[in-house]
Image (tube, rainbow, N blue to C red):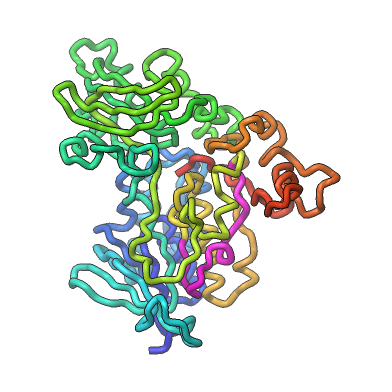
Amino acid sequence: MERDALPVAVVGAGPVGLAAACHLLERGLEPVLLEAGEAAAASVAQWDQVRMFSPWAYNLDKAAVRLLRRHGWQSPDPDLHPTGAELRRLYLEPLARTPEIAARLRLGTRVTGIARHRLGKVRDGDDRAATPFALRLQGPAGEERLLARAVIDASGTWELPSPAGADGLPAIGERDPAVAARIRYGMPDVLGGERARYAGRRVAVLGSGHSAIGSLIELAELAEAAANTAADTAADTTVTWLLRRSDLERVYGGGERDALAARGALGERLRRFVETGRIAVVPGFLAERIALGDGGLTVEGETPAGPAAVTLDELIVATGFRPDLGFLGELRLELDSGLECPRVLAPLIDPNLHSCGTVRPHGAAELAQPEPGFYIAGMKSYGRAPTFLLATGHEQVRSIAAALAGDEAAARRVELELPETGVCSSDLRVAAETAETTESGCCGGPAPTEAEAEACCARDAAAKAEGLEGCGCPEAEPAVAGGGCGAR
């Protein structure tokens, strides 16, 4: 079978994977959606209770909306903030049920490997780019192979949470079954389905991103709401925040300066609970060992003041997520060694370099790999960077679909519009820039007039003056605020 007669395989039927299928259909390309879960958006169901800090206006893909409206769908109020459950029920599930998507959606089908058909990773040849991709699948019919003309990996990162250990490895003892039974990763449903697990317990949250903040707030609300009800054991809930950072102000975020008001409000609510003592903070805590004893779970680590240990009943680890690269081992990839994202994208999103949430618009060109026709999109494209926003993924797959259809002008065109933000949740290499950043914009403000003309900002000019490549900040004209530092 000729390669161009084959479908485009989309790995993952989450928000970005579904959007990719819609854009491919509009381009006259045939998609096949491969979803490991038993329903579309299976990972979203794991955070149903979480209310997003971006409103519907930033969570709906345009091609998906066009398809839905052909079937009589009514759009939610663009200014309201959906929960994960509402995102699924009002948008993703209706989209998956449309005849166009349902006919191309394969549920319960996990991709276990991707390669070039009958070509190993090492083998060169003039025909490598023209050779179809071979996807190894594990599904209801057992193991099988699927050939595809191109592949968009939008499988996300939810299934691979980062561990508690400060060095990126699991803390000693973390994988022990008895210990693991007391640990929950991500953001549990503290006020709903998992209330009994945490009510009246000593609970610690490890992390500083929005998942950690959300869990801390819900735990504090659980204890506060029951404080005046003696019969409610939830009043005995104690909350400890194990914070790797030492600067709480940076974690609280931009507050009223954040263009996404719901996100700014999170930091302010967290601040109130900390300042009233409802949440105890252990700043600069670097976890090294976790053990289960008669007194409960003990987490040992180092702080700026020396060794520290916290004894608790339950631990929530919210230290981010990682991309699963295991099934991509037979493909030729160029990934950043630190972030594990496409190499060209890395300087645009690296939290070590950027002092604010601006993200240069990007698409097929930045996401392309040495294997022509293979792209990583959505949250997985950001690797370990915590700055992804859903609208960014929609723009990615719009551009990729255009590139696969041969419309290079559309692939290069920028159609991403996001709000600017004063929020910074990344560690900066130069802490003194913090105040300057909030005053002057991203990366230290504009480049000085004496800097070389191509410098896009103060940090870029300083880096180039030292003979470096620059900071990778967005250029002045096409820059669009990402609004997503620390966002998931």
The residue furthest front is 306
The image quadrant where one finds the N terminus is bottom left
Point out residue 229 in the picture as x, y percentages from the top left corner. Answer: 24, 12
| Residue 362 seen in render | yes
**Foreground of the two, 441 or 385:** 385
The residue furthest left is 294
The residue furthest right is 450
Identify which residue is drawn at 49% across, 26% down.
Answer: 246
**Foreground of the two, 226 or 336:** 336
Write the start and end of the magenta stretch as one range.
Answer: 357-376
Q: How many marks?
A: 0
**Residue 172, picture quadrant:** top left
Identify which residue is drawn at 44% across, 27% down.
Answer: 284
Q: Is residue 2 above or below residue 85?
A: below
The residue furthest bottom is 1
Point out residue 445 in the picture as x, y percentages from the top left corner. Answer: 73, 39
Point out residue 344 in the picture as x, y percentages from the top left corner. Answer: 57, 60
Left of 416 or right of it: where is 5? left
Point out residue 335 in the picture as x, y percentages from the top left corner. Answer: 49, 60
Identify which residue is drawn at 60% across, 44% down.
Answer: 353
| Residue 214 seen in render | no
The image quadrant where one finds the C terminus is top left
